[in-house]
């Protein structure tokens, strides 16, 4: 009887523990989800509802005005632009710049990183610990580099080119400048991820191909690249998201010519009305969509990518 | 068609010499098997012939031409790898066609030659499948078809059967031997399995610690092992070894050691007198019972093989030996027995160097 009671007590305690754990996790989920919910909710609110007390959890008069404003073409309809809005905050410039910069930088990093990873994997370039050293580079906080890069881009390079070539070339606020810095900062990730995929391709496949008369380049093109293709997709998406969400470097190294979405988001400020929460929330929502979609895509490809060890040995 | 010569071939990794000065002439059309324990340098030697490994020093000559600086693909070799190395993202057809595609052979010719190779290896129904859909034996055939399609003069095979189960392995031995007879190409085959070497080879190279221990036909190596290592490596069960001394008396040479006294063949000369030696005798030459049985022992374990039975027994001084006897033996564990060695089948090796002495 005593044993039976003890068993029941134990069972009840376990059930309580499980309920407690779920409660904590649910609470934490709410904390995480709330800003996203608030952003989406705000994106459908008109100016009057942005800051109210008590807060309107859901817009009382839902409006698409914010979306109309950010997606507007050409000069804004004065009724849409609201008197308070002194500038036309449309998404197009930011979207275009971000897409251009992120795609170019991610592709460039992928291309360079794949070949670097191949060299490290196959020829032990840089010695035994090089792969770890590469990852360590990423541990430096971006702000540390941001200022020094700014000095290079805006002062040293223009000065040096003027003195040496007679032409002033500035990297500050240029697509090339931003693409370069994004390529460099994401390269360690690409190398690290591609290493894990390339290491999985057995040496003997390459040996077999070479004995059949294929040169090194042909071996890479016909054997290695097809086998790591899904890995490359995963890596590209991962790096693309990193670049898409990057803010600090873009903020430091550009203005006013190149404007990525994250920088654009920071500009929704008007003299008369303060922060323009509505359009800002609308852009936030729009910008998050590709990230979520890519994230879901990654999930699908990750399964394929990481079950890669199934190459028959 | 091409013979291969290796001249003072050395491969060192740092201070470790994987291959330590090998000289070898491989005849045109020969089935040569390199055999030895793991780390004896046989695969390294094969990789140097293929060009995947660069020799530290020495020369590799294929068909009269020094090929040291030639790319692997330019040496006119075909190779089958231990893990087969089929390209997992290509169909069987594309796997076989790969060597022709990189040589820019016209498509119609590729189709014809792949079909012919598939015909030879009996894998025509597999052509549209992926390697992962093929069984072990099928993959093996695909790997062979991929090699024969480019019509190489020399085939290099690096333990190609090690991934197969025991039965299939024995079947594939016969098939490989037939293939060799059909193609009349030079086959260089690496294995650590002495049975594979015995059954397939024209000649066997036994390697140990980066050097050649012995080169000869399978029967030469089995019947006249030149070192104790070779003697111990070939044959199942392992040859019996007994340490002792050679004595010469009026009746001829005798061996004494581990409580045994054994007559030796007449060929054992006076120069071995009083020398420390290791006597080696195969289990089938340990004779139990009979008039000549001079030593006593106790049976410990019986292993019936069907066509024969292995008797593990201890000598009076606790030395453990194995005899192969007829399957209907009346011996049982614990029973005493008397035995002797067939004198004409006793091998004598020097105790320190392991070199053959008789």
Image: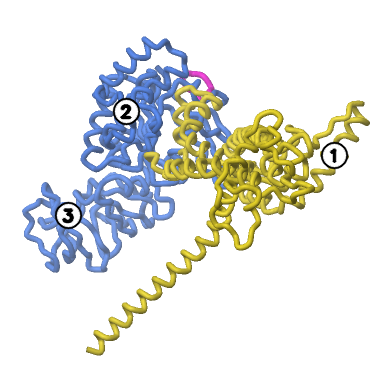
Chain colours: A yellow, B blue
Which image quadrant for residue B300?
bottom left
Which of the two marks, 3 or 2, is nearer to us in this view? 2
Which residue was labeled with disc 2?
B142
Which residue was labeled with disc 3?
B310
Q: Position of residue B111 (x, y in %)?
A: 34, 14
For residue B42, side relative to residue B246 (left or right): right
Residue at 56%, 51% in the rendered image: A59
Which image quadrant for residue A311?
top left
Q: Chain of mark 2?
A: B
| Secondary structure that dominates the magenta span | strand
Height in image: A24 above or below A104?
below
Residue at 50%, 23% in the rendered image: A214
Nearer-the-camera pick, A91 or B270? A91
Height in image: B348 above or below B242?
above
Question: How many neighbours does mark 1 have within 10 angstroms: few (below 14), some (14-19), or many (20 or more)?
Answer: some
- The answer to whether the residue labelled 1 contacts the one labelled 3, judged by CB atoms less than 8 Å apart, is no
Residue B16 among magenta residues: no
Q: Position of residue A24 (x, y in %)?
A: 48, 68
Q: Which residues are magenta?
A: B60-67
Which residue was labeled with disc 1?
A154
Nearer-the-camera pick, B150 or B290? B150
SS label for mark 2: helix
Q: Chain of mark 1?
A: A
For residue A120, side relative to residue A180 (left or right): left
Residue A194 in view, yes or no: no
Q: Position of residue B1 (x, y in %)?
A: 39, 17
SS label for mark 1: helix
SS label for mark 3: strand
Residue B339 in view, yes or no: yes
- Report how far apart the C-alphas of labels 1 and 3 lie in the structure: 88 Å
Query: Is label 3 on the same chain as label 2?
Result: yes
């Amino acid at each position: 009887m005593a044993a039976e009671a003890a068993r029941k007590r134990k069972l009840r305690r376990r059930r309580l523990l499980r309920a407690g754990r779920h409660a904590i996790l649910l609470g934490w989920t709410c904390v995480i989800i709330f800003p996203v919910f608030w952003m989406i909710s705000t994106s459908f609110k008109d100016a009057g509802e942005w800051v109210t007390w008590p807060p309107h959890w859901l817009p009382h008069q839902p409006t698409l005005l914010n979306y109309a404003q950010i997606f507007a073409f050409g000069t804004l309809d004065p009724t849409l632009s609201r008197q308070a809005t002194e500038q036309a905050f449309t998404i197009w410039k930011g979207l275009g710049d971000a897409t251009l910069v992120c795609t170019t930088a991610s592709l460039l990093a992928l291309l360079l990183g794949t070949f670097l990873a191949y060299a490290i994997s196959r020829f032990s370039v840089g010695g035994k610990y090089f792969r770890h050293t590469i990852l360590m580079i990423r541990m430096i906080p971006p702000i540390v580099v941001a200022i020094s890069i700014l000095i290079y881009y805006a002062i040293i390079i223009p000065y040096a080119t003027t003195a040496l070539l007679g032409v002033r070339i500035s990297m500050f606020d240029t697509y090339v400048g931003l693409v370069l810095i994004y390529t460099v900062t994401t390269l360690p990730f690409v190398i690290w991820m591609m290493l894990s995929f390339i290491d999985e391709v057995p040496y003997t496949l390459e040996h077999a191909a070479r004995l059949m008369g294929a040169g090194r380049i042909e071996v890479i093109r016909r054997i290695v690249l097809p086998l790591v293709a899904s890995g490359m997709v995963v890596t590209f998406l991962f790096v693309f998201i990193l670049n898409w969400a990057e803010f600090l470097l873009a903020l430091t190294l550009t203005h006013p010519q190149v404007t990525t979405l994250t920088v654009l988001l920071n500009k929704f400020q008007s003299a008369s009305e303060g922060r323009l929460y509505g359009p800002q929330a609308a852009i936030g929502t729009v910008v998050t969509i590709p990230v979520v979609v890519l994230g879901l895509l990654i999930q699908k490809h990750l399964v394929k990518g990481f079950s890669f060890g199934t190459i028959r040995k | 068609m091409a013979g291969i010569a290796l001249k003072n071939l050395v491969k060192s990794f740092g201070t470790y010499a994987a291959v330590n000065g090998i000289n070898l002439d491989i005849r045109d059309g020969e089935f040569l098997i390199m055999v030895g324990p793991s780390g004896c340098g046989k695969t390294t030697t094969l990789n140097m012939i293929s060009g995947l490994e660069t020799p530290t020093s020495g020369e590799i000559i294929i068909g009269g031409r020094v090929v040291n600086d030639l790319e692997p693909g330019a040496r006119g070799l075909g190779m089958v790898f231990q893990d087969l190395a089929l390209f997992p993202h290509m169909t069987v057809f594309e796997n076989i066609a790969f060597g022709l595609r990189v040589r820019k052979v016209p498509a119609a010719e590729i189709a014809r030659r792949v079909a012919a190779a598939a015909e030879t290896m009996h894998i025509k129904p597999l052509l549209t499948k992926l390697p992962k859909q093929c069984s072990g034996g099928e993959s093996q055939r695909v790997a062979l078809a991929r090699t024969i399609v480019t019509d190489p003069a020399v085939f290099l095979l690096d333990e190609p059967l090690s991934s197969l189960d025991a039965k299939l392995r024995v079947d594939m031995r016969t098939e490989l031997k037939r293939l060799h007879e059909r193609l009349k190409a030079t086959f260089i085959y690496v294995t650590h399995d002495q049975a594979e070497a015995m059954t397939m080879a024209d000649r066997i190279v036994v390697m140990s610690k980066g050097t050649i221990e012995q080169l000869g036909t399978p029967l030469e190596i089995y019947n006249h092992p030149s070192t104790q290592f070779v003697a111990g490596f070939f044959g199942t069960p392992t040859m019996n070894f007994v340490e002792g001394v050679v004595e010469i008396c009026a009746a001829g040479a005798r061996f004494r050691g581990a409580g045994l006294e054994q007559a030796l063949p007449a060929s054992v000369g006076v120069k071995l007198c009083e020398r420390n030696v290791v006597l080696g005798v195969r289990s089938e030459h340990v004779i139990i019972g009979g008039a000549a049985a001079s030593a006593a022992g106790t049976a410990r374990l019986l292993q019936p093989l069907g066509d024969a039975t292995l008797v593990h027994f201890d000598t009076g001084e606790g030395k453990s030996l194995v005899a192969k006897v007829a399957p209907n033996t009346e011996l049982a564990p614990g029973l005493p027995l008397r035995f002797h060695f067939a004198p004409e089948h006793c091998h004598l090796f020097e105790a320190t160097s392991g070199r053959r002495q008789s």
